[in-house]
Image: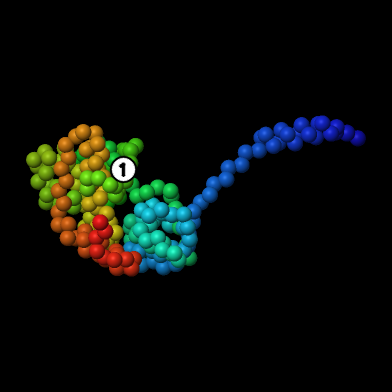
């Protein structure tokens, strides 16, 4: 019969303790109470920040805008047709932001900074907040064609959302343009932003605000 000494047992236990590595990851989650019209109301997400990106169970990304005592109002950055009541949502810990780089010059993108001109993905390793304190394009296809004919697309970025895009994306489009412009501005390069019909963005903001049950007027 093999006998094990007390000091051997102590050594074995000590080795096991030293080798034990447990990572504790705290995830801020919530549950979908209601979804519709580009807005979702979430129970939970107790530690979420205003403007923070949240990810729904089926992959849709949203932005937490209304932080109420009983629920969080989230605007969806997509149609959200696959989101179900009772499904889970998790906070990402990141305030709404988009990738930025010189590679965006000459490209046509949507509000999420995804290319919509059929010319492939855009590489980027840097990000800027969509809405930030400091300096702040929606364009029709004919304008893009004119820019291309005159060679202006070499130093132009077009951010576009169509009339049938969700109100949330129409609302965020000008901020995406501003974030990209700031990327160049803070590198001491000249920038100019042209907004085409800001009234559409104002309408989108009003629609979102009414759905979120918040004052539809502009905050200062």
In the rendered image, residue 172, in percent from the top left (x then y), is placed at: 27, 54
Q: Secondary structure at mark 1?
A: strand
Q: Residues within 10 Å of mark 1 (few under 14, many from 20)?
A: some
The answer to whether 33 appears left or right of 38 in the picture is: right
Q: Name the one closer to the observer, 40 or 186.
A: 186
What residue occupies the far front of the structure in this picture?
220
Most foreground residue, 125 or 72: 72
- Residue sitting at x 25%, y 50%: 175
Tell me the residue at 28%/56% (across/down): 169
Name the residue rendered at 41%, 68% in the picture: 34
Q: From the viewer's side, name the closer residue of 201 and 140.
A: 201
Q: Quadrant of residue 78?
A: bottom left
Figure quadrant of the C terminus: bottom left
Residue at numbered disc 1: 128
Q: Position of residue 213 (x, y in %)?
A: 33, 68
* Quarter of the view holding residue 101: top left
Quick check: can you spot residue 138?
Answer: yes
**Residue 38, image x, y percentages:** 33, 63
Residue 110 appears in view? no
- Up the image or down, 87 lies above or below 97; here it is below
Residue 35, percent across and down? 39, 66
14 w.r.t. 47: above or below: above
Residue reaching furthest to the right: 1
Q: In screen coordinates, is 208 left or right of 23?
A: left
Compared with 183, 63 (above or below) is below
Classify the position of the N terminus by image quarter.
top right
**Residue at the spot x=69%, y=37% of the render?**
17
């Amino acid at each position: 019969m093999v006998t094990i000494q007390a000091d051997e047992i102590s050594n074995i236990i000590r080795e096991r303790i030293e080798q034990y590595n447990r990572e504790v990851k705290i995830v801020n989650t919530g549950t979908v109470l209601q979804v519709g019209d580009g807005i979702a109301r979430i129970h939970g997400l107790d530690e979420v920040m205003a403007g923070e990106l949240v990810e729904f169970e089926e992959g849709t990304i949203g932005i937490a805008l209304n932080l109420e005592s009983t629920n969080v109002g989230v605007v969806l950055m997509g149609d959200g047709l696959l989101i179900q009541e009772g499904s889970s949502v998790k906070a990402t810990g990141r305030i709404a932001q988009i990738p930025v780089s010189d590679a965006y010059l000459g490209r046509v993108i949507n509000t999420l900074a995804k290319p919509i001109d059929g010319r492939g993905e855009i590489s980027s390793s840097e990000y800027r907040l969509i809405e930030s304190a400091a300096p702040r394009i929606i364009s029709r296809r004919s304008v893009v064609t004119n820019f291309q004919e005159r060679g202006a697309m070499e130093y132009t970025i077009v951010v576009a959302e169509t009339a049938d895009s969700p109100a949330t994306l129409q609302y965020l489009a000008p901020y995406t343009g501003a974030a990209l412009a700031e990327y160049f501005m803070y590198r001491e390069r000249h920038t100019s932003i042209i907004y085409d019909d800001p009234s559409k963005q104002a309408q989108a903001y009003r629609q979102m605000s009414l759905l979120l049950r918040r004052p539809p007027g502009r905050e200062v």
